[in-house]
Image (cartoon, helix red, strand yellow):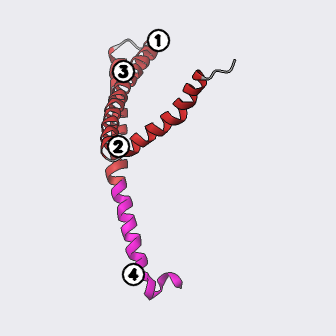
Amino acid sequence: MPQLDVMTFFSQFFWFSLMFSCFYLFLAYYILPIISLNLKLRKRLLDIFAKDINNKKFSMSNLLFTYDNTLLKVLTFFRLYIVKVLFFSDSWLLLNLSKISLSFFSSSNVNYVTTISEKNFTPFVLNCLFKIK
């Protein structure tokens, strides 16, 4: 069997072990915490929902109101969280882009602006000066 060939078995086993370990670490550090957080949030929401139902007189309108209220709280929380993440990522991106632009691409930016101004501004000026009526 070519899979158990003595010459290639060690390299195949090595690469399989390496890739499997990398995949396992990726799952353990990135995917599983997200799943765990999701399950904890669901449990917390169910607890809040059950507590609200038990505190109020049970009726369909109260149940729908409680559900809507809980959903509004969750969506408000996630909206604020997403806005905060977008704000920080946007400010980080603008800061780093300006640093990169000033450090690495300063001469190319000057050349670009010069070229664009020559290509766009010169025909405009000539057109304004020599308007054909």
Return the disc, 2 or 4, that comes first in the chain's sequence: 4
Which of discs 2 and 4 lies nearer the camera? The answer is 2
Left or right: 118 in relation to 10: right
Farthest front residue? Answer: 130
Cα distance in 3D space between marks 3 and 2: 47 Å
Residue identified by numbered label 3: 73
Q: Secondary structure at mark 3?
A: helix
Q: Secondary structure at mark 2?
A: helix
Return the disc, 3 or 2, that comes first in the chain's sequence: 3
Which of discs 4 and 1 lies nearer the camera? The answer is 4
Residue 57 in view in this figure: yes
Residue identified by numbered label 4: 10
Cα distance in 3D space between marks 2 and 1: 64 Å
Quarter occupied by residue 101: top left
**Which of the labelled discs sits on residue 106, or is there none?**
2
Q: Where is residue 51 shown, x and y percent of the image?
A: 32, 21
Return the disc, 4 or 3, that comes first in the chain's sequence: 4
